[in-house]
Image (cartoon, rainbow, N blue to C red):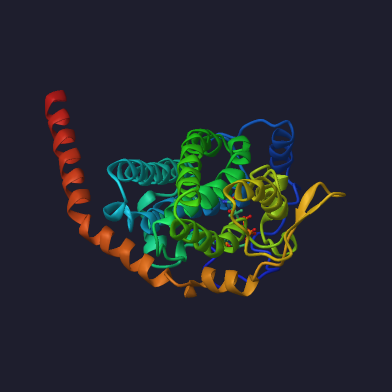
Amino acid sequence: MYTQGLDIKPGDKAIPLETGSSEAEQRFQERIDRDERIEPKDWMPEGYRKTLIRQISQHAHSEVVGMLPEGNWITRAPSLRRKAVLLAKVQDEAGHGLYLYGAAETLGVSRAELVEQLLSGKAKYSSIFNYPTTTWADIGAIGWLVDGAAIMNQIPLCRCSYGPYSRAMIRICKEESFHQRQGYEIMLTLARGSAEQKAMAQDALDRWWWPSLMMFGPHDADSTHSDQSMAWKIKRFSNDDLRQKFIDATVPQGEFLGLSFPDPALRWNEERQSFDHGEIDWEEFWRVIKGDGLCNRDRMRARNKAHDEGAWVREAAAAYAEKRAARARAAAE
Ligand code: FAQ
């Protein structure tokens, strides 16, 4: 199974830019250029297949690991309504993981293999889920900022050149949109509440702002895969372009909440019609990706525990499927 391991450095070129030299590759690129969708049975360059398996599986793992920070608050949600909404959201994330593992499987890799990559620590998942959720306001900040960043990144994926991925993203984006709204509503309630509640909202924004910006990936100049992924129309916008769009959309929302952003360099640039902002701590970004964030070990422990404890469910499902198949075989004889 293809994966980049955990030690990729900025500037490494993991997959050489496909030259389109063979006739098949040229025809493939022409289809991409015409905006045609590539389907599982179509011919595709090996690099295209591997890039998709890498990105889709990392995305699936992120959805599944992403259940953990919020799962932490299901038993402590402040009201029955908040609990029901949070439960629904976390269940949606599990569903997203399933659609995405399904989309990856159409590329000839098994879900069991991908899950094994995650559990053994070889596969990446989004850096954002290695930060702790220490107060209820973090649930608001995750919905508003993390789902907000996820949507900004994922709407263009609805037009990704690979059919099964692009179709999975349509439903995922609709659900992410509900998630973003529920998060913003929590932030609004806290920001309009007592001084203590407003301080909680501010503290959550302070802690989640920079990690949310990191979700978009390294600077374009340090992005290993962007050039090729954009040529193949897997990615439609660069990491920096999407990050900027997110900042431009989100800062006015924070201002409406009456909260401030933890970036003294953040200011409107009239000429660019966009916000200038400070530099991301890239050292922190790479450290978290390499497994040394605040919660990496906890997340891996929790996923492995859940997987081990769920073994009996997988065995029972397999035994039931086998029993039904045997019955069907006997009936056909
Ligand atoms: N974290 O060359 P690039 C969500 C890695 S879902 C960890 O720029 P690429 C829903 C990258 O994999 C959030 N690793 O890579 C939710 C590569 O390593 P590799 C997940 C990162 O693929 C909300 C290396 O750095 N979304 O939030 C990160 O062209 C709330 C070089 O980077 C997706 O997965 C990172 N932040 O662009 C759930 C969307 N950034 O593989 C629960 C689909 C980069 O060579 C609660 N993915 N890396 O070893 C994408 O759009 C792209 O994969 C990017 C990265 C934009 C993330």
Q: Position of residue 288 (x, y in %)?
A: 52, 70
Position of residue 242 measured from the top left corner of the image (x, y, whole percent) = 68, 49
| Figure quadrant of residue 151 | top right
Q: Is residue 37 left or right of residue 292?
A: right
Q: Along the line of sight, which residue is nearer the eye, 192 or 184?
A: 192
Q: Image quadrant of residue 95?
A: top left
Q: Position of residue 160 (x, y in %)?
A: 62, 39
In the figure, is residue 9 to the left or right of 145?
A: right
Q: Residue furthest front?
A: 194
The residue sitting at 16% across, 40% down in the picture is: 320
Q: Quadrant of residue 163?
A: top right
Q: For the C terminus, give its image quadrant.
A: top left
Inspect this view and state whether residue 96 appears.
yes
Please state the quadrant of the image where ligand 1 appears.
bottom right
Task: Work out whether 58 lies above or below 293.
Answer: above
At 61% from the left and 46% from the top, the residue drawn is: 256
Q: In percent of the image, x 56 and y 46: which residue is there? A: 148
Q: Is residue 68 left or right of residue 104?
A: left
Q: Position of residue 110 (x, y in %)?
A: 39, 49
Please tell me whether residue 3 is drawn above or below residue 82 in the rendered image. below
